Amino acid sequence: MMPSLPIAYEEIINFFAAGPSPQHIINFQPSATVQDRVADLIFQEKTTGLSNNEKSELDHYLLLEHILRLTKARAYDHLPDAPNSNVAAEDNLTES
């Protein structure tokens, strides 16, 4: 049996399992539930501090956010009208 994953992981896994287009990747936003949880953890970290488990949870969210930012930046290269797009390059080859 697979251990329970935080909701943010579940959202991202399900999103990528569906085979999103580059534009869908760029438009992806975590749910309000995840955004609220991260905001709560950050507020708590600045005010009362976090337990070790909460610190680990926040670290995971921040790592996921970093990975998503990198993925979104890369997705721009795969848009059909991007200057360095693989799709644009393939179109140019077929037009010749």
Image (cartoon, rainbow, N blue to C red):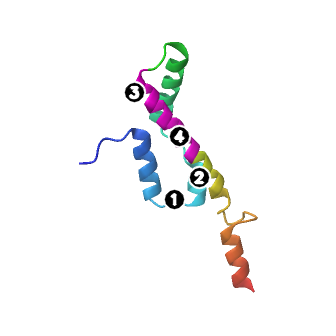
Residue with the most extreme top position: 48
Camera-near label (4 vs 1) is 4
The residue identified by callout 1 is 20
Residue with the most extreme bottom position: 96
Q: Earlier in the sequence, mark 3 or mark 2?
A: 3
The residue identified by callout 2 is 71
Which residue: 40% across, 45% down? 10
* Tags 4 and 3 touching, CB below 8 Å: no
Q: Identify the element where label 3 is drawn.
A: helix
Where does residue 13 sit, x and y in percent of width and height? 42, 51
Residue 45 in magenta? no
Which residue: 66% across, 71% down? 87
Q: Identify the element where label 4 is drawn.
A: helix
Which amino acid lies under the numbered mark 2 shown in the image of this protein? Thr
Which amino acid lies under the numbered mark 4 shown in the image of this protein? Leu
Camera-near label (3 vs 2) is 3
* Tags 3 and 2 touching, CB below 8 Å: no
Where does residue 53 sit, x and y in percent of width and height? 39, 27
> How far apart in space, not on screen, are marks 2 and 1 (Cα)?
12 Å
The residue identified by callout 3 is 53
Which amino acid lies under the numbered mark 1 shown in the image of this protein? Pro
> How far apart in space, not on screen, are marks 4 and 3 (Cα)?
15 Å
User: Residue 63: which numbered mark, if any?
Assistant: 4
Q: Earlier in the sequence, mark 2 or mark 1?
A: 1
Q: Earlier in the sequence, mark 4 or mark 3?
A: 3
* Snapshot quadrant of residue 52: top left
* Tags 2 and 1 touching, CB below 8 Å: no
Magenta-colored span:
51-67
Q: Identify the element where label 2 is drawn.
A: helix
- Local packing at callout 1 (Cα closer than 10 Å; few below 14, some 14-19, many 20+) is few
Which amino acid lies under the numbered mark 3 shown in the image of this protein? Asn
